[in-house]
Image (cartoon, helix red, strand yellow):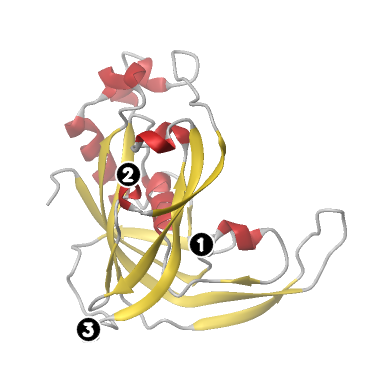
Amino acid sequence: MHENKIEFEVSGDYALFSDPVTRVGGEKLSYQIPTYEALKGIIHSIYWKPTIIWVVDAVRVMNPIQTESKGIRPIKYNGGNDLSYYTYLKDVRYQVRAHFVWNENRPELEHDRNENKHHNIAKRMVERGGRRDIWLGTRECQGYVEPCVFGEGEGAYDNINELDFGFMYHGITYADEAMNEKDKGAMTVRFFNAAMKKGIIEFPKPEECEKTRFIKNMEIKPFGNDNFSGFSEFEGVTD
């Protein structure tokens, strides 16, 4: 078990976890379980610095999976409104376990690699419900975070040996977080075969996903005194 892990519970009335490709317009349909990328986004809202990369280890589904469709009138790209049906997950609650590793693609931030500091700040932010607003896959789905012990309490699928969710979107690898040499200097999208065992989905690490697709070339944005507070001698105090 990783020493710098965090564990928290996130809940909300509705959630919409989907492949970004399906979000361009028209109907939207949520996956039955959270995506790795959505959970990572929640963790970024709790605490994030470019010095670290958050790795989502596992998610535990606490409430029964149920959906609800709503008629929505989204704004069209060329103006006006349209009528679409969005299918959301309803009354969701999850336990999440994650840890961070150093972002080796950012040698300019090596001086900020203080594991104790980042871990303590992350745990405090979990206790406070996050630094920024929590979204469950999309902005209209508000979420709420609180500390928990992963595995404690009764979950809806504790007695189900295994449920297979098939081939599923895992997340996007940006150039500054690429761990594999073949992904350097590019944006790629990852996929994996998702299965839930006794209510728990254990995620492969991004670099372990065998199915990927190249999206585009991408350069790493550099950080320095003008755009990163970590370069300040007072950064440890202001956090």
| Mark number displayed over residue 142 | 1
- Tags 2 and 3 in contact by the CB under 8 Å rule? no
Depth order, front residue of 190/64: 190
Report x, y in % for residue 97.
25, 57
Q: Earlier in the sequence, mark 1 or mark 2?
A: 2
Depth order, front residue of 235/35: 35
Q: Earlier in the sequence, mark 1 or mark 3?
A: 1
Q: Secondary structure at mark 2?
A: strand
Report x, y in % for residue 28.
63, 70
* Residue bearing the label numbered 3: 161
Looking at the picture, which amino acid does disc 3 mark?
Answer: Asn
Looking at the picture, which amino acid does disc 1 mark?
Answer: Gln
Q: Earlier in the sequence, mark 2 or mark 3?
A: 2
Alpha-carbon neighbours of circle 3 within 10 Å: few (<14), some, or many (≥20)?
few
Please tell me in which quadrant of the rendered image residue 196 appears.
bottom left
**175 in relation to 124, above or below:** above
Depth order, front residue of 19/68: 19
Q: Left or right of 81: which side holds 171?
A: left
